[in-house]
Image (spheres, rainbow, N blue to C red):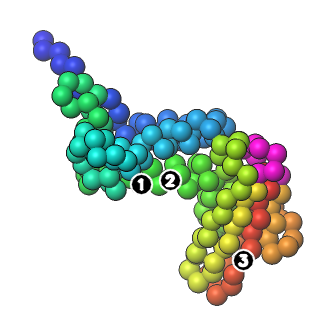
Amino acid sequence: MIVRKCPQLQYTHSSIWVIIALAILGFGDKALDFYKMINPIEHARTKEAANKYKVEPYVIAADIYGAGNLVGRGGWTWYTGSSSWYYKAGIEYILGLKVQNGYLKFEPCIPKEWTEYQIQYKWKNSVYNIKVKNPEGKNTGVSKVILNGNEVDNFIKLDGDTNIYQVEIIM
């Protein structure tokens, strides 16, 4: 029997699933730290880092090698489905914007230090200007959802007409 050591340090699909799990568990600070770690631009911030990474800094690599002369090198770019999981982790699980059965729902899991952020979401011909405020420095939890000045439940029916909606989320 031949046993080989795999020179892989990061298998990106599973790393992203860890980020999603951290967000589901409410660990917003850690989820964002890991999210940044996987971001390909972080592997190419300096000429030295880019020379080590050796792949495109704008494409999620399927893996990052961790042994021998390949340490820090990205592999399998343009091949992986990890980019869609990375997008999902950022939009749905960290920022908390979820689209389900024709409704918007908000379930952010962010770092405590974030006081607010904004998202503009377009669905068909409607635009949703969303501002999430975190006055108490929480990782998770939505206290109020305000749609065009009126408090509503945390399910906003999507409208495809040419309307513009102002949405305020208070954590």
What amino acid is labelled 1 in the image? Ser
**Distance from the alpha carbon under mark 1 to that under mark 2:** 6 Å
User: According to the image, label 2 marks what residue?
Assistant: 88
Q: CA distance from mark 1 to mark 3?
A: 27 Å
Residue 58 is situated, as x and y percent measured from the top left of the image, at: 34, 56
- Badge 1: few (under 14), some or many (20 or more) residues near its Cα, within 10 Å? few
Query: Does residue 147 appear left or right of residue 125 in this picture?
Result: right
What's the mark number on residue 84? Answer: 1
Residue 18 percent location from the top left of the image: 49, 35
Identify residue for label 3: 165
Magenta residue span:
134-143
> Marks 1 and 2: CB-CB under 8 Å?
yes
Between residues 155 and 128, which one lies in front from this camera angle? Answer: 128
What residue lies at 26% left-to-right and 30% top-to-bottom? Answer: 71
Nearest the viewer among 129 and 145 is: 129
Q: Which of pointers 2 and 3 lies earlier in the amino acid sequence?
A: 2
Image coords of residue 34 (percent x, y): 50, 38
Q: Residue 28: give x, y in percent of width and height.
A: 63, 40
Number of marks: 3
